[in-house]
Image: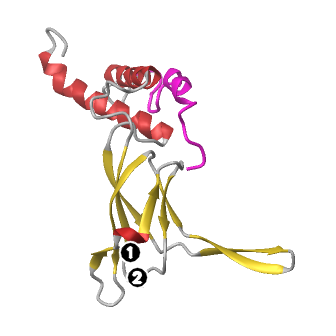
Amino acid sequence: KMEGFDEDDDYLTLLIAAGREKVEEYCKRSFVPTQYVFGFRGWPNFSRGWLSHGLFGVGFDRTLELARPPINSIDSVKYYRSSDGTLVDLDAERYKLDTTALPGLVKLNGSMPSLDYDFYCPIQITATTGSWGTDNVNLPSRVKLAILLTVATFYENRTNVVIGTIATEVPDAAKSLLNSLKLRNM
């Protein structure tokens, strides 16, 4: 809260949330707990064959990748059943969250039920992401500073028309603070 500027409190709260979201987008991570629904177009069933000592073996990669790590929990895995198009829960014993991986991985086991492909994303995984708590107190200093630099840029440039240059990205100073936290290839 700024003394003497009460009319800006709501605006500053909005800017702080937008600044955090922009920093999370840049880093491809979630810094505070957030619930997302991830959609998938089908069950993974990629087989890899290899030849070893004259024997042929097949391994199966039965994982779904979830963006915005770290993934704290899987709240539900649902799918549209092929027989009647109903959205139903997948039994929890048929999947496991791998919290050690970046991005987050949901490992599937056993055969998967048939899907209704009339739906664009017949698989929906609801997950909670984020690692540093809800109050921003536990955020690393460099993340806090990057958010503040982004908020300052938003505050100074309140309109779409700016004489000179237009700042629409996370400021370069903020990027340099965040580069070691940024996930690549996601």
Q: SS at mark 2?
A: loop
Query: For the residue carrying disc 1, how many other residues have a C-alpha within 10 Å: few (<14), some (14-19), or many (20+)?
Result: many
Question: Which three-letter amino acid code belongs to the residue tagged 1?
Answer: Pro
| Residue 105 vertical position relative to residue 115 in the rendered view, above or below | above
Q: Where is residue 8 in the image (x, y as percent from the top left)?
A: 18, 20
The region drawn magenta spans 163-186
Q: Is disc 1 in contact with disc 2, using a CB cutoff of under 8 Å?
A: yes
Q: Residue at x 44, y 62 (%)?
A: 96
Question: Which three-letter amino acid code belongs to the residue tagged 2?
Answer: Leu
Is 83 or 4 nearer to us in this picture?
Answer: 83
| Residue 54 vertical position relative to residue 139 in the rendered view, above or below | below
Q: How many labels does the image show?
A: 2
Is 145 or 8 nearer to us in this picture?
Answer: 145
Q: Quadrant of residue 124?
A: bottom left
Q: SS at mark 1?
A: loop
The answer to whether 186 appears left or right of 139 in the picture is: right
